[in-house]
Amino acid sequence: EEGLALDFFATYGTHDHATLVARFNGQYEWQCKMFPTAVNTSGVYVTLMSGLIAIFGWDMLLLMAGTDQDAFGRLCGRYAEWIQQYYDAAAECDADVLYCHDDLVWTEGPFLHPDFYREHIFPHYKEYWAPSIEAGKKVIYTGDGNYTQFAKDIAAAGAKGFWFECFTDLKYMTETFGQTHVLIGNGDCRPLTFGTKADVRAEVERCMALGKSCPGYFMCISGHIPANVPVENALYYYDVYNELGQR
């Protein structure tokens, strides 16, 4: 009951708008200095569900959602009102591309009924991104797990790109969005971690076979390359990508 009644403004306060804009710009300027040839971005990590996960942890979050889903929906709305101040500031920063990170689902898909997401999550995305879209920025949504069934909802809210793990269906994403949206990811880190060089090549070939025809496809390994990947496999992955990634 205490969690479902949390007042985010009373608990976390508000932030000066100009200060937030300066923080976004400072982070973006650092990226541009460190990686001058990259597509540098800014954005928000704790967008909505990820924010609630960070605050409550999974056990409490699932208990609240399962106990009183209507009250949990209202909690999402109050959090969205609080985090909007960050998106309003991001809309005024110097970055042309913004990431919106939100872990909505698990490996096998949604952990709440899909209707809940469409009533209590995606309308807030549209509100979040409206100032940035009006300012001419592009929003890229990024999330873990399998969010295939929600990709059209996220696009309808205004996203112009997707970052996704190997669990989201690359064939569906390329067929549905490959000619209109940026697509990033889908490489599986398991062949790099536990496989042979043949396994690594097969994984790059799988992604290239679908993504190469899409003008905005960027291959990367889901979750990026963790420290336990053998160095020789990581280097071989890089060589195979450079070999197969040329259009």
Image (spheres, rainbow, N blue to C red):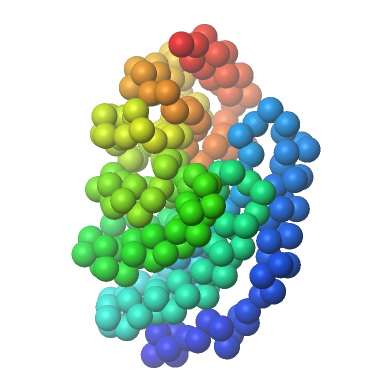
State which quadrant residue 122 falls in: bottom left
State whether residue 106 appears in this view: no
The N terminus is located in which quarter?
Answer: bottom left
Q: Position of residue 21 (x, y in %)?
A: 68, 61
Q: Nearer the viewer, residue 205 or 180?
A: 180
Q: Is residue 39 above or below residue 230?
A: below
How many labels sit on residues?
Answer: 0
The one nearer the camera, 219 or 247, is 247
Residue at image location 64% in from the left, 39% down from the top: 40
On screen, residue 95 above or below 86: above
Question: Picture coordinates of residue 133 (x, y %)?
Answer: 47, 52
For the point 42% across and 23% down, which residue is it? Answer: 215
Residue 38 visible within the image: yes
Residue 201 position (above or below residue 161): above
Q: Is residue 238 left or right of residue 211?
A: right
Q: Residue at x 38, y 23 (%)?
A: 214
Tell me residue 209's x, y (percent).
Answer: 34, 17
Q: Position of residue 131 (x, y in %)?
A: 50, 59
Please tell me which residue lies in front, 151 or 194: 151
